Amino acid sequence: MTENLILVVEDEPSIAEVVGLYLRRAGYQVIYAQDGIEAQTRIDSQSPDLIIMDLMLPIIDGFELTRWLRDRSDIPIIMLTARRDEVDRIAGLEMGADDYILKPFSPQEVVSRVRAVLRRTQPKSNEPTEKPLIYPSMEINPQTRLVIINQQEITLTAKEFDTLWLLAQHPRQVFSRNHVLERVWGISDYIDPSTVTVHIRRLREKIEPDPSNPKHLLTVWGVGYKFEP
């Protein structure tokens, strides 16, 4: 029985109730917030392991709440949205959301997404310790989940680090976007491949001296991405 605590931020009680019901059946603990202010209080006081939030919230919307959270934590975020425009979904990912689900949705899909995100973001104590990867100007440490570039620490979100770690473990090997989704997100059937594109862009902004002319995270056009040491 899992003891992960999930915060559901949703202003429609019927949706929150159904999502919470299925999560509890799957063994998760569930707490609720109906707006962004209440969500901030819950996050500060109870430190959930994952947050499911509606994009269109009263007082503070999902975009602003994600921005606020990413300034202080890498708690995984799954956005619920009725907006089907790709621009809105990409905006949420750019701000640091780990995944999104379009309304209307199946509660079972929500549970599957939660499992996949937690599987990729939580440490696995029974796995052998992985050693840092050390390159001439970069060190990637899987224990501290920090990247050090020219002696400066770079803090990444969970998915950003996992994406970089996957590519850096296999230098010069090309990974398609679907392959990255399967290895990092643990699922590829429901997630837009542009999710990977967004995370690569964010990574470049953090680790590349010139993100528009990257030296480490390279695009192989028509195929995918690779890491150049």
Image (tube, rainbow, N blue to C red):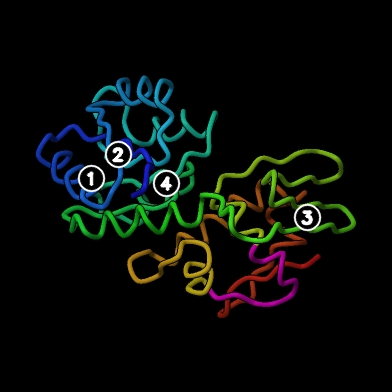
Magenta span contains residue 72:
no
Magenta-drawn segment: 166-176
Labelled pair 3, 1 in contact (Cβ < 8 Å): no
**Label whose residue precedes the other's in the sequence (3 or 1):** 1
Identify residue type, mark 2: Gln
Q: CA distance from mark 4 to mark 1?
A: 30 Å
Q: Quadrant of residue 92?
A: top left
Residue 179 appears at what percent x and percent y? 52, 74
Pointer 2: what residue?
29
Residue at 9%, 39% in the rendered image: 14
**Is 142 on the left or on the right of 26, as rendered?**
right
Residue at 27%, 32% in the rendered image: 31
**Which disc, if any, is residue 115?**
none
Residue 60 appears at what percent x and percent y? 32, 25
Labelled pair 1, 2 in contact (Cβ < 8 Å): yes
Quadrant assignment for the C terminus? bottom right
Pointer 1: what residue?
24
Number of disc labels: 4
Pointer 4: what residue?
91
For the residue carrying disc 1, how many other residues have a C-alpha within 10 Å: few (<14), some (14-19), or many (20+)?
some
SS of the residue at dot 4? Answer: helix
**Is 61 on the left or on the right of 172, as rendered?**
left
Identify residue type, mark 1: Arg
**Is 29 on the left or on the right of 145, as rendered?**
left
SS of the residue at dot 3? Answer: loop
SS of the residue at dot 1? Answer: helix
